[in-house]
Amino acid sequence: MENPELDKIRDEFTEIAGQLGVRLGLSRTVGQLYALLFLSDEPLCLDYMVERLKISKGSASTNIRELEKWGGVRKVWVKGSRKDFYEANPDTLKIVINRFKSGIQERVNEMSGGIDKFEKALSKIENSLSVEEKKKAQFYKEKFRKVKKMQTLINTFLKIIPKKIFL
Amino acid sequence: MENPELDKIRDEFTEIAGQLGVRLGLSRTVGQLYALLFLSDEPLCLDYMVERLKISKGSASTNIRELEKWGGVRKVWVKGSRKDFYEANPDTLKIVINRFKSGIQERVNEMSGGIDKFEKALSKIENSLSVEEKKKAQFYKEKFRKVKKMQTLINTFLKIIPKKIFL
DNA sequence: TACTTTGTTTAGAACATTCTAAACGTTCTA
DNA sequence: TAGAACGTTTAGAATGTTCTAAACAAAGTA
């Protein structure tokens, strides 16, 4: 059943997937877990993954749930076993894209909040500023507006992504 | 010239930009440096940035060049000074997008190479496999083809991005 | 040539992340 | 109810990243 050549290919594939995981802001292990499930024609239990990837039970547990959170895997029930089994969500591309989108959106929105705050702060102190300082404040305001415009563009764009990429 | 309120706003803005830098796979300091230049109406020298951000000269030197590499800033020559001065590339959005694109593309291409290698390796050993193993090898091949398809989609999409977002 | 100014490189410190191992809690089984 | 089988949590180890400080290199100035 176990062929060393086939196993080697699988192991190297998971390794590459691990690097992709890191790039996506997840951990290496998350990527490896997904790859292992992606290359399996049946659901796998934690013990198996621990064995295959040579990782600890704790790490497997934590990371598989992280992966679940991102919609990368789902728990499946296997009759006759008390273990948790998992299978890969086959829609890999969607997972990757969602990971990206929410990552960007999160940060963009966080920034939006900050900018609003700054603009208010500027307006508040504007009157007490010298002519020179007023000029600077005005300059800042323009820059902030520019950032906001950028955020709007990004948000609009993110909304288009799924439509465009799944045509 | 220095107004504490204005300075506070600038400092908080650079702080947020630092977090954005991290999200983009650059360092915090890179983000902060860009923000500082972005909010300045004149080119700044390294000493000034060291002073403002309370970072070391070495860090400033290394990170400003990283930023330069990504097209975020450019060196400008200021008459009467031997120092290097920098100014922000005003096209922030383009920088961010380029950063993303090349980051993804790099990884996708790296993966493509790996997949090709795997497919060749599979073809090579195919004959020496048992019936059961052959089935597994076939299964792997299908999966690899799926990954390749995904990569093609992503590449196509990345080519569209600039057209769509700058309309 | 000696000194100053400026930017770069690098060894190691500080920090953040992610892993492991072990303790723990829960649920099932005998 | 005792023990086994699992998954989860957590303290600390291992690892990786990015910073600082200091030595260094280069190039101008006196």
Image (spheres, coloured by chain):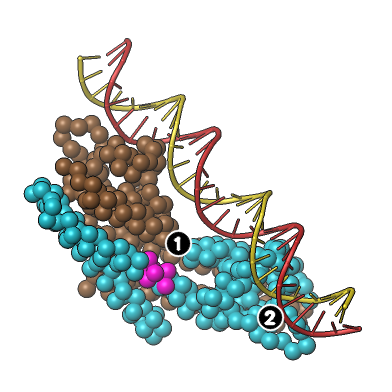
Chain colours: A brown, B cyan, C yellow, D red
Q: Chain of mark 1?
A: A
**Is A154 displayed left or right of C30 in the figure?**
right
Q: Magenta region, mostly helix, strand or loop?
A: helix
Spot the residue most to the left. Answer: B131
Give me the residue at 19% from left, 43% from top.
Answer: A2
Which residue is drawn at the image coordinates 74% and 72% (left, top)?
B47
Q: Amino acid at mark 2?
A: Phe
Q: Which mark is residue A106?
A: 1
Q: Amino acid at mark 1?
A: Glu
Is there one chain holding both mark 2 and mark 1?
no
- Mark number for residue B85? 2
A131 falls in the magenta region: no
Nearer to me, B10 or C23: C23
**Camera-side residue: A90 or A107?**
A90
Residue B128 in the image, given as x and y percentages of width and height: 13, 52
> Would residue B39 be found to the left or right of residue B72 on screen?
right
Residue A51 appears at what percent x and percent y?
31, 39
| Crowd band around label 2 with a 10 angstrom C-alpha radius: few (<14), some (14–19), many (20+) | some
Residue A163 seen in this snapshot: no
Give the answer, above or below, for where B164 lies relative to A122: below
Front residue of B96/B147: it is B147
Q: At which x and y percent is residue B139? A: 15, 55
For the residues labelled 2 and 1, the Cα–Cα distance comes to 34 Å
Residue A82, quarter of the rendered image: top left
Of helix, strand and loop, which one carries label 1? helix
* Residue name at image x 57 percent, y 73 percent: B67
Magenta span = B102-107
Give the quarter of the image for residue B5: bottom right
